[in-house]
Image (cartoon, rainbow, N blue to C red):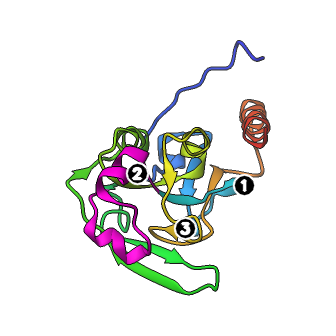
């Protein structure tokens, strides 16, 4: 659509200073910290504890959240994701469960592939695994619970430095992302 537009993609799980690094636009996941940045919600995020049918057949299907303490969990090294997962039942009762595992991976796509390969339970976002759940490569282990590692109600956000001046290239890219994400 815009052949002269150049995209310089930086993939990182750290929060980069957009002003210092001269970055036009970022996508941030989770809850936003207070800042001077402008933010627009791109989409809601929902997490699932999932596993492959093969893993569940071999190790058993956890019935209640505390059962995962006896399972190998595939862990993400960000604060909270590595040590505990939080569950909220349909009656809004919250439970925090300690998790442990032999595999810690700093990339969600790699965690997804390990879960599909039957290596353990994983806490992964809807936008990454919805096709895997639909096609049966992964199973939602606790379909009657909302689950997260940090806070419920997280989202993906578009953040940029200024509302006063938004370059055309940034506006075009924001519109493109919103159109693609909303389907």
Q: Relative to residue 125, is residue 81 drawn left or right? A: left
- Which residue was labeled with disc 3? 33
* Residue 161, image x, y percentages: 64, 50
The residue under the point 46% across, 49% down is: 16
- Which residue was labeled with disc 1? 40
Q: Secondary structure at mark 1?
A: strand
* Residue 52, image x, y percentages: 42, 46
Q: Is residue 140 visible?
A: yes
**Residue 61 sits inside the magenta stretch:** yes
The residue under the point 45% across, 37% down is: 11
Q: Relative to residue 150, is residue 101 drawn left or right? A: left
Query: As rendered, which of 131 and 182 lies closer to the eye?
Result: 131
The reply to whether callout 3 and callout 1 are in contact (CB within 8 Å) is no
Q: Earlier in the sequence, mark 3 or mark 2?
A: 2
Q: Indicate whether 5 appears above or below 41.
A: above
* Residue 170, image x, y percentages: 71, 35
C-alpha gap between disc 3 and disc 2: 13 Å
Q: Relative to residue 23, is residue 178 drawn left or right? A: right
Task: Tell me which segment is drawn in magenta.
Answer: 50-73
User: Residue 14 has which mark?
Assistant: 2
**Residue 68 sits inside the magenta stretch:** yes
* Residue 122, image x, y percentages: 39, 54
């Amino acid at each position: 659509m815009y052949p002269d537009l150049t995209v310089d993609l930086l993939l990182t799980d750290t929060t980069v200073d957009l002003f210092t690094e001269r970055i036009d636009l970022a996508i941030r996941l989770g809850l936003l910290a207070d800042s001077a940045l402008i933010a627009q919600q791109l989409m809601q995020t929902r997490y699932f504890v999932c596993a492959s049918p093969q893993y569940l057949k071999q190790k058993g299907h956890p019935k209640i959240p505390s059962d995962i303490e006896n399972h190998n969990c595939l862990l993400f090294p960000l604060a909270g994701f590595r040590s505990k997962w939080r569950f909220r039942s349909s009656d809004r009762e919250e439970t925090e469960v300690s998790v442990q595992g032999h595999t810690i991976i700093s990339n969600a796509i790699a965690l997804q592939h390990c879960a599909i390969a039957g290596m353990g339970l994983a806490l992964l976002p809807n936008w990454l695994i919805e096709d895997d759940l639909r096609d049966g490569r992964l199973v939602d282990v606790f379909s009657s619970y909302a689950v997260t590692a940090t806070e419920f109600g997280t989202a993906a956000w578009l953040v940029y430095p200024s509302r006063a001046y938004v370059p055309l290239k940034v506006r075009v890219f924001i519109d493109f992302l919103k159109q693609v994400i909303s389907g």
